[in-house]
Image: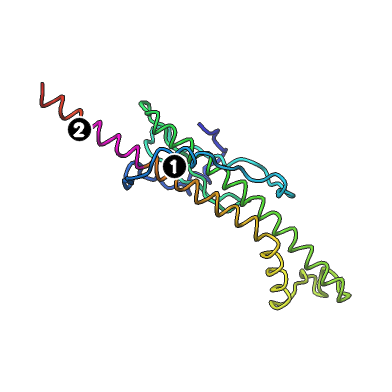
Amino acid sequence: MLPCAAGARGRGAMVALRAGKKSLLRGLSRSFVCRGCQLAPERGAERRDTAPSGVSRFCPPRKSCHDWIGPPDKYSNLRPVHFYIPENESPSEQKLRKLRQETQEWNQQFWANQNLTFSKEKEEFIHSRLKTKGLGLRTESGQKATLNAEEMADFYKEFLSKNFQKHMYYNRDWYKRNFAITFFMGKVALERIWNKLKQKQKKSNN
């Protein structure tokens, strides 16, 4: 369980998700699962600026039997999910939940760091251009000095170009993780159907 954050502000933004209604996927081989689980973490060499780690902490009602979505994280802008843990959780269900949790933490850390880097480099770019023009950081009226859209387009283009490889690695790992999660969702759904069929067969035999 994640520790509760103080105050009711976060709880007001939570929305319950009904779990268990997942589509079935067939034809995925066991070898794919082995490869899919070898998921690379974020590359340390690329993490120049690091935001506070971990997903936003909040607590759903204790008696809830569903996954819950919390308010957006202030660093990554992603909404964290608190995953429900049933008492009779099967090994496959546990593996699926842990994979989803680990993927959420990986995604949270990537975008928190990326947003921090973006904001920092954007401010540095603006200050550099203003200095070149001989302007200060504030206008005569005391407002924060800014650049026009054409000047900022140079920064956006440079930032995207410089981070192209990082985004490419992120997209690759994101697809790997989603394929692995989708596979286990199908496996869990099949196991639940099989268990229901076995229970029905036992009742008919009795």
- Image coordinates for residue 132, horizontal then vertical, percent: 87, 73
Q: Residues within 10 Å of mark 2 (few under 14, many from 20)?
A: few
Residue drawn 43% across the image and 39% down it: 31
Identified by mark 2, the residue type is Leu
Front position in the image: 95 or 130: 95
Asked if residue 127 is positioned above or below residue 26 in the image, the reply reads below
Asked if residue 31 is positioned above or below residue 158 in the image, the reply reads above
Which residue carries the number 2 mark? 197
Name which quarter of the figure residue 91 lies in: top left
Asked if residue 148 is positioned above or below residue 48 in the image, the reply reads below
The part of the chain drawn in magenta is 186-197
Q: Residue lying farthest right?
A: 134
Q: Along the polypeptide, which appears first: circle 1 or circle 2?
A: 1
Name which quarter of the figure residue 149 lies in: bottom right
Identified by mark 1, the residue type is Phe
Q: Main secondary structure of the magenta part?
A: helix
Residue drawn 16% across the image and 24% down it: 202
Q: Is residue 48 magenta?
A: no
Mark linked to residue 32: 1
The C terminus - image quarter? top left
Asked if residue 12 is positioned above or below residue 125 in the image, the reply reads above
- Image coordinates for residue 37, horizontal then vertical, percent: 50, 39
